[in-house]
Image: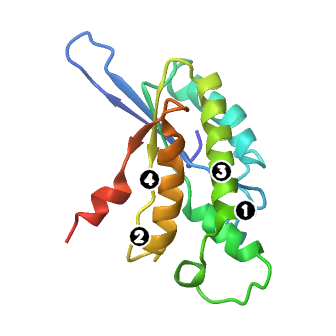
Amino acid sequence: RSHDQHVCRLPVGPGGDGVVLGIFAHYGVTGPPYWVYAYPLAPWLGSTTDQMLSTDTVCFSASALRGRDPTLVVLGSGYWDIAAWWAHGVGHAGGNFSDTFEVDATHVVAYVTGVVRAVSSLRTIYPSSRLLWRTLHPGAKHKITPANCRLLNAAVRARAAEMRLEIWDVGRMMQAVP
């Protein structure tokens, strides 16, 4: 079992199947290339996001879920994507990516394209699962800027209905925290 993939079984009651939640970690929907800290990739992960989703999650489901689809798949991306854009960008001058990097229209297009591809892949792999997108939020630890979060979150929200993607709006939830 991978350290980057987790399952949680919530019992319903005596004799009930319960709810199965699957959470799959990956290194961003826009890679490769990934941020330097993703390398070397863990030996249990594919070398691309597509492989991580199409191969690794299937192996995970076969063992952890006994071949069943998860009830709910929570998918999110952004921190690794922003870090990779910063690290592999033109004119990279060092510093902290989260304090200095500004997402532009090219990044937004790449991000949405990656999200659409990942969601499409998961819809094929897990046709009966609910897919939930976890939005980005600024934070004290990673310091991703509010502006970057707003741009990427808005782009996914704008396409969510056509992807039949439910939104877990952690970004807006965190804005409400004093």
Q: Earlier in the sequence, mark 3 or mark 1?
A: 3
Q: Secondary structure at mark 3?
A: loop
For the point 75% across and 84% down, which residue is it? 92
Q: Earlier in the sequence, mark 2 or mark 1?
A: 1
Marks 3 and 4, Cα distance to the nearest angstrom?
13 Å
User: Where 175 falls versus 19 (above or below)?
Assistant: below
- Location of mark 4 (residue): 135
Q: Position of residue 76 (x, y in %)?
A: 51, 49
* Occupied quadrant, residue 85: bottom right
Q: Nearer the viewer, residue 152 or 89?
A: 152
Which mark, by number, is residue 138? 2
* Occupied quadrant, residue 98: bottom right
Q: Secondary structure at mark 1?
A: loop
Q: Nearer the viewer, residue 14 or 91?
A: 91
Q: Position of residue 117 (x, y in %)?
A: 68, 39
Q: Earlier in the sequence, mark 2 or mark 3?
A: 3
Type of residue at label 4? Thr
Marks 3 and 1, Cα distance to the nearest angstrom?
10 Å
Type of residue at label 3? Val
Quadrant location, the N terminus: top right
For the point 36% across and 50% down, which residue is it? 169
Which mark, by number, is residue 29? 3
Of labels 1 and 4, the one closer to you: 4
Q: Secondary structure at mark 4?
A: loop
Which mark, by number, is residue 34? 1
Marks 4 and 2, Cα distance to the nearest angstrom?
10 Å
Marks 1 and 4, Cα distance to the nearest angstrom?
20 Å
